[in-house]
Image (cartoon, grey):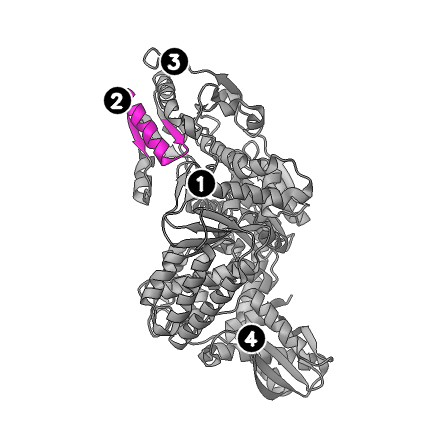
Amino acid sequence: MNYCVSVRTLCNFTAKHGDLDLRFTPAPSAQEGIAGHSLVASRRNADYQSEIVLGGDYKTLTVRGRADGYDPVNNQLEEVKTYRGDLHNIADNKRALHWAQVKIYGWLLCQTKNLKDINLALVYFDIASTQETPLVELFTAAALKKYFEDQCELFIAWAQRELAHRTARDAALTAIAFPHITFRPGQRDLAEAVYKTASNGICLMAQATTGIGKTIATVFPLLKAMPKQRLDKLFFLAAKTPGRKLALDTLALMGKSTSQLPLRVLELVARDKSCEHPDKACHGDSCSLANGFYDRLPQARYAAVQSASEGALDKTAVRNVALAHRVCPYYLAQEMAVWADVVVGDYNYYFDTSALLHTLTVNHQWRVSVLVDEAHNMIERARSMYSAALDQRHLQAVHATSPRAVRGVLDKLNRAFNDMHKTQVDGYRVVEEIPLDFLKDLQQVITVVTDFLVANPTRLDADLQSFYFEALHFARMAESFGSHSMFDITLHDAVHENALLVPSSGCATLNIRNIVPAPFLNSRFTTARSVALFSATLSPPEFYKETLGLPQTTSWIDVASPFSHDQLYVAAVRNVSTRYNDRDQSLVLIADLMAEQYEKAPGNYLAFTSSYDYLQKLAQCFTQRNPHISTWSQTRQMDEAGRTHFLHRFTDQSKGIGFAVLGGAFSEGIDLPGARLIGAFIATLGMPQINAVNEEIKNRMASYFETQGDTPGKAYNYTYLYPGLQKVVQAAGRVIRTQEDTGVIYLMDDRFTRPEVQRLLPAWWRINEVTKRLSKKEK
């Protein structure tokens, strides 16, 4: 059995040497790269052949790839590399890597066409000027064959080890058993649905109550499916750190339950959390871990594989290996993503504009399955990935300290800002199209700053680079601007008055706000063999399916809850309104209702409100009326230590009420079983505030979906109702965590008694509609 490897992977493994050098070398976007390759091909003669699929064998190795183009008239094979800036700034080790690739392609073509020699051309294409710089050399087939075999020899021992690992991995996963004696109620249904998605090559949306063990019920069936479906990788993606930790713990459990499970598990963490020297630049002249990085990488790579056989390559394990071999932990982890079986990381590693895991999947043509944990977070996270903002105040601050070479274009861009909002009366305005003149001025800034940074690669100007990257992202989002997004202008220090923004200064922020991420995400779903999105709150499914761009073939399962309505008393209070204008009048009623419940059943409770302002008022009112009851509150910008202290107040012996904001850190992802939490008071529907921005989002929703013949209320539901109730159900899910738990939930707003709202709440709840009677003190 041969081990298959791409030309790119082979050369990255054998032909990379020297320093890790990330001095400013601006790279073209993927779209620009594709456009550049197409333009080069269009300039060639009629006989020119583009995108040539090539392959060849050496011993037990099969090498495959796709060469950019071949000109049979001139017997010339071309490899096109797009770039920005000065060609001379491309590092020597990168040029050597490029030559290695074209030489491998050269031999594969000579072998295919029985050529005695061939002209190999590295064509460097400048994205800005559209100029080509070809570097051409004539090689004999014999010389290229020797080079090919030499590179294969450098890789073949690793390939044989990888082949043995894959064989052992698949054999172990075929025999793997569920790590618990039995499935919990609902777990088997979920596991079977996930297994079928991998078998059928489709996507799945799975709604399952918090506490049934969704992580093991999704990870286990995909591990089981890997051998039969020939899956190369499993990606477990989570929105927050606790989700990633739970995945790593689950995979560790799988390893312990099966003797010698040869499964390489890797955790990817953000650069700012893994950088050893944040005060140094990423190149060999500044950072010792970048100096000679590629020379020491082979030993570090081998050590990391050995470490993975003993446990997950989590943040700590990667760091230990990296420092032992004096390489950068962050970039060692990125290298190990190629060789891992399971990768655990944030959503952005697969779904963002330049996502590492998606790029690797496409480049290596992997068969992957993707698990998306707590998938109700995906809409907001995806919107943020494909949105962009430019702040005029930031521009002016950068201009004030910028070098003379770029000051002129920054000043011109500032004037373009002013031209867009100089006649604006309202503090907030939506503009149907992004003005072309502004985009031209922005592109000029990008070009000039690019040239300056390329010419001064060692200059550290953090503010200029920060604004530059903001400008680049804004320009790229502008290129893909469409009905899925909206463009608006907010004048600074504008204040809310009667749901309108009123301006009070002369600067503005320009926003490209993505509303419907579906057009960007659809290809991410179809690239994978299967994707399973799971959460306790994915209702109604069409909201998530349409907004995220899931394929029409996507399956849906609503796993029956293992919990009984006898475990949870749910009350919807008829005569309480938490609407904005009614909040002050609601405080006493809500505070006394909470006190009554506490006196009836003393213990630990959470009280959720819509905002910090409302939280402070309610907590103050409650404490004044009930000074004998212990309370504690979430605060604005609460740090990790503060959050930990807040949660530590919930013990098996403690009693009191913690006040928190719905949708915040304590609404989901926390586990307080048993007596640690026996009830929740939810004084809000969680809906976004009705303001100018959200009303425009609603209008854009209506426009986007109107061609599908949708009902008039759909835009309102998609903008306000569904996102709000998703937060409510997530918060309520903190109360019942096991089949032994009991508790109460008070839904304190009259709108919870409406049938259209109750239809969106968990089916296993039995909702009791109650009226809070006024006490004599209240009267």
Where in the figure is residue 42, as x and y percent of width and height? 67, 75
Judging depth in this view, the residue of 327 and 411 nearest the camera is: 411
Q: Work out how far the residue at label 4 is from the one at label 2, CA to CA, in angstroms.
A: 71 Å
Q: Earlier in the sequence, mark 1 or mark 3?
A: 1
Callout 2: SS: loop
Q: Earlier in the sequence, mark 1 or mark 2?
A: 1
Q: Work out how far the residue at label 3 is from the one at label 4, CA to CA, in angstroms.
A: 75 Å
Where in the figure is residue 555, as x and y percent of width and height? 65, 42
State the residue position of label 1: 500
Judging depth in this view, the residue of 227 and 340 nearest the camera is: 340
State the residue position of label 4: 81
Q: Are marks 2 and 3 in contact (CB under 8 Å)?
A: no
Q: Earlier in the sequence, mark 4 or mark 2?
A: 4
Split into 4 quadrants, where in the image is the C terminus? top left
- Is residue 534 inside the magenta stretch? no
Where in the figure is residue 551, as x and y percent of width and height? 65, 48
| Amino acid type of the residue tagged 1 in the rendering | Leu
Q: Residues within 10 Å of mark 2 (few under 14, many from 20)?
A: few
* 314 lies above or below 133: above
Where in the figure is residue 738, as x and y percent of width and height? 47, 30
- Is residue 627 inside the magenta stretch? yes
State the residue position of label 3: 774
| Amino acid type of the residue tagged 3 in the rendering | Leu
Q: Residues within 10 Å of mark 1 (few under 14, many from 20)?
A: some
- The residue mark sitting in front, 1 or 2, is 1
